């Protein structure tokens, strides 16, 4: 079998572990040939690739980022994108393509699968918002980075008697905010699923100072917004690929909370540090299992499917179903967190 693999969309700790696992399972156990496309779908659209053998993936298990490179380019961005992809798959004699990516990548994977290409998707995102899989690799690492940052920020916040508003990633969902906020014992967690009321938030933070505490930490997901009419808010715009370019919820909240509370407030934006560096052991194992199972699915001819974690098992789910909705933070998970803040 000849397998093409690519990594597309925002990078994520664990991508290299998937690539390595695909190569090991395919080359060692099945005697397959594997090629890796450069910079995501762009590599497939331009037939820009290299051969991946055991030497090519040696030593990458613990490395962050992706040795193949990534981009946000998608076949649908070109008028002839789908046809071009089909042409290159035929020219290169590929029997399977394994795209590793998040929401946008999996939508593109579904589009190509519908067009008849032999696709087996692997979900990734630090945001953990892909429906149909209990967890995505990268999430555990990102939560760990955010939690460590929150722990550190507590000591400086206390020294200066400040409110620190810490913005974590999460365009549509608040999983990183919820988990890191719970793990670090933040004093308020603000997520996109639940538009915040600035008065309630001010009361909550103010109550801490009234109780004699010297500081407060608020964790906010970058995609969080105030309840309609609650405060003036700049939502930002879109980037060249139609992705949100946020105006900065932490910055806006810090101005508002400082004014309302009469306490110094500072925004801290963790940004891409959450996506960089070495994956945790959990993420390496999940990524490795996804890679292994993607190769097996390709050999069974199970195309148009995606690897998924259900409980402790890896299963295959239809791509069409996986891209239907996002996995948002349910109300009861938020309630659990609120009690312990
Ligand atoms: O999708 C993962 C994610 O980390 C989002 O939380 C974030 O909004 C986005 O990627 C940022 O991506 P970019 O690298 O394009 O700035």
Image: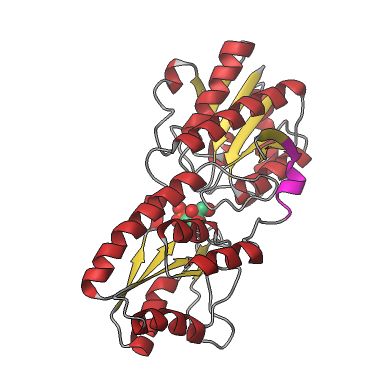
How many marks can you see?
0
Taking 301 as reference, is 227 left or right?
left
Q: Nearer the viewer, residue 183 or 300?
A: 183
Q: Residue at x 70, y 50 (%)?
A: 323
- Residue 49, can we see it? no
Q: Residue at x 49, y 30 (%)?
A: 17
Q: Residue at x 60, y 18 (%)?
A: 26
Q: Residue at x 53, y 79 (%)?
A: 226
Give yes or no for residue 121 being in the magenta stretch.
Answer: no
Image quarter hosting the N terminus: top right
Taking 236 as reference, is 267 left or right?
left
Q: Nearer the viewer, residue 183 or 73?
A: 183
- Residue 44, can we see it? yes
The x, y position of residue 82, in whole percent, is 69, 42
Q: Which residues are magenta?
A: 316-324
Depicted 142 relative to depicted 340: above or below? above
The x, y position of residue 272, in whole percent, is 39, 53
Taking 294 as reference, is 177 left or right?
left
Depicted 143 relative to depicted 333: above or below? above
Depicted 98 relative to depicted 188: above or below? above
Q: Nearer the viewer, residue 201 or 54?
A: 201
Depicted 268 relative to depicted 162: above or below? above
Give yes or no for residue 323 being in the magenta stretch.
Answer: yes
């Amino acid at each position: 079998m000849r397998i093409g693999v690519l990594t597309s969309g925002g990078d994520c700790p664990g991508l290299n572990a998937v690539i390595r696992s695909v190569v090991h399972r395919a080359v060692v156990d099945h005697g397959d040939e594997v090629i890796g496309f450069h910079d995501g779908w762009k590599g497939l659209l331009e037939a820009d690739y290299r051969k991946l053998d055991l030497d090519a993936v040696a030593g990458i298990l613990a490395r962050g980022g992706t040795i193949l490179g990534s981009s946000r380019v998608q076949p649908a961005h070109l008028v002839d994108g789908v046809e071009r992809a089909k042409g290159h798959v035929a020219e290169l004699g590929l029997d399977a393509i394994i795209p590793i990516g998040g929401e946008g990548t999996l939508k593109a994977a579904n589009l190509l699968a519908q067009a008849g290409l032999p696709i087996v998707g692997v979900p990734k995102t630090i945001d953990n918002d892909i429906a149909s899989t209990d967890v995505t690799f990268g999430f555990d690492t990102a939560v760990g980075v955010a939690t460590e940052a929150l722990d550190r920020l507590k000591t400086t916040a206390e020294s200066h008697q400040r409110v620190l508003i810490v913005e974590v990633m999460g365009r549509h969902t608040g999983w990183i905010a919820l988990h890191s906020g719970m793990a670090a014992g933040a004093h308020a967690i603000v997520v996109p699923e639940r538009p915040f009321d600035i008065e309630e938030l001010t009361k909550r933070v103010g109550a801490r100072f009234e109780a004699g505490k010297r500081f407060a930490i608020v964790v906010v997901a970058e995609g969080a917004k105030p309840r309609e009419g609650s405060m003036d808010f700049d939502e930002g715009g879109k980037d060249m690929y139609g992705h949100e370019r946020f105006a900065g919820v932490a910055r806006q909240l810090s101005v508002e909370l400082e004014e309302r509370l009469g306490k110094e407030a500072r925004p801290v934006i963790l940004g891409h540090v959450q996506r960089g560096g070495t994956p945790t052991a959990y993420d390496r194992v999940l990524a490795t299992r996804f890679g292994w199972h993607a190769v097996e699915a390709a050999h069974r001819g199970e195309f148009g499917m995606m690897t998924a974690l259900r409980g402790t098992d890896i299963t295959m789910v239809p791509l069409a179903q996986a891209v239907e909705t996002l996995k948002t933070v349910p109300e009861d998970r938020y309630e659990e967190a609120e009690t312990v803040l």
